Image (cartoon, rainbow, N blue to C red):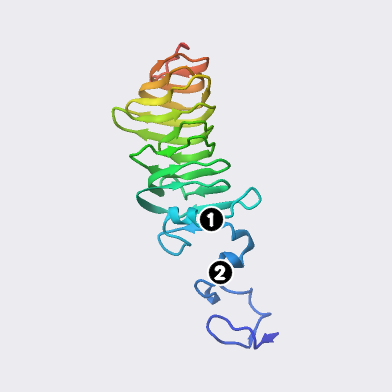
């Protein structure tokens, strides 16, 4: 069957549409395949140095104005280094932010969390407090960067790596509501985990925390299991199971 109405990218018509194995990628014009043409792609916003919807992660997130539980979005960030120039990204509910891997997607700048949202597979480098989660409860998965879990937020950290430097550095600063850390690695020159609030619960499991003050508990309920603790534990632990030091020697639960 030939069609004189169908023209391929080379401008010719009258081709036999029954022959071959379908439309070839070489016959598709650049830019012809757009999110509106592919149903499953409509709620994905791509950030890339070139060829994406945006070159800035901030602009990509800010462009989304109709996200909801029934209309969720994904901001997909391609490999590269994205310098926000001292600005930060404010996450939005029902908008996940996903890099292409902690070692190949790096954002220089801060990020503010949001409820019902996740950040994953990327690295944030910030000199101004890292990821701030005041009164919000995002999921943080396969992420490298500082996490500030203050206020009333209840973040869940999974497969997170944190490195901080400086006399006043803090890897994780917990807030006034529960914080869960699973498979988290923290290396800090001062506080690895700091829990200054009374009446909250912090759970650390299958993790490694290193700092002069590895766990500084100032009134929280801190439970630690299956974790390497390299540094001082102050304030005690309410729950403790199978913790050990940098030499893999068992630590008696304080």
Q: CA distance from mark 1 to mark 2?
A: 21 Å
Q: Which part of the image, by quadrant, shows the N terminus?
A: bottom right
| Placement of 130 over or under 33, stated as above or below | above
Q: Nearer the viewer, residue 208 or 53?
A: 53
Query: Residue 147, percent across and down?
Result: 43, 35
The answer to which of 158 and 128 lies nearer the viewer is 128
Q: The residue tagged with tag 1: helix, strand or loop?
A: loop
- Write the residue at 54% across / 32% down: 154
Quarter of the rendering containing residue 131: top left
Q: Is residue 191 left or right of residue 61?
A: left
Quarter where residue 42 is shown: bottom right
- Element class at badge 2: loop
Question: Residue 170's spot in the image, x, y percent?
Answer: 37, 29
Residue 156, how many percent across, how many down? 53, 34
Is 229 in front, or is 124? 124
Pointer 2: what residue?
Answer: 33
Q: Residues within 10 Å of mark 1 (few under 14, many from 20)?
A: some
Lower position in the chain sequence, tag 1 or tag 2: 2
* Residue located beneath label 1 in the image: 64
Disc sitting over residue 102 in the figure = none
């Amino acid at each position: 069957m030939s069609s004189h109405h169908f023209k391929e990218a080379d401008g010719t018509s009258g081709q036999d549409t029954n022959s071959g194995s379908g439309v070839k990628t070489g016959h598709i014009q650049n830019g012809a395949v757009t999110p509106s043409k592919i149903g499953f792609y409509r709620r994905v916003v791509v950030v890339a140095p070139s060829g994406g919807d945006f070159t800035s992660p901030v602009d990509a997130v800010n462009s989304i104005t109709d996200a909801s539980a029934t209309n969720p979005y994904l901001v997909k960030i391609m490999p590269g280094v994205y310098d926000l120039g001292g600005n930060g990204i404010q996450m939005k509910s029902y908008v996940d932010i996903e890099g292409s891997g902690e070692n190949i997607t790096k954002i220089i700048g801060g990020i503010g969390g949001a409820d019902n949202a996740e950040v994953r597979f990327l690295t944030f480098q910030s000199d101004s407090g890292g990821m701030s989660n005041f009164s919000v409860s995002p999921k943080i998965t396969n992420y490298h960067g500082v996490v500030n879990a203050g206020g009333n937020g209840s973040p869940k950290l999974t497969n997170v790596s944190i490195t901080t430097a400086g006399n006043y550095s803090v890897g994780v600063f917990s807030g006034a509501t529960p914080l869960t850390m699973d498979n988290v690695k923290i290396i800090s020159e001062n506080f690895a985990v700091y829990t200054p609030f009374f009446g909250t619960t912090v759970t650390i499991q299958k993790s490694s925390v290193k700092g002069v003050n590895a766990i500084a508990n100032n009134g929280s309920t801190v439970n630690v299991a299956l974790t390497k603790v390299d540094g001082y534990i102050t304030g005690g632990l309410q729950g403790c199971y199978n913790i050990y030091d940098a030499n893999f020697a068992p630590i008696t639960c304080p």
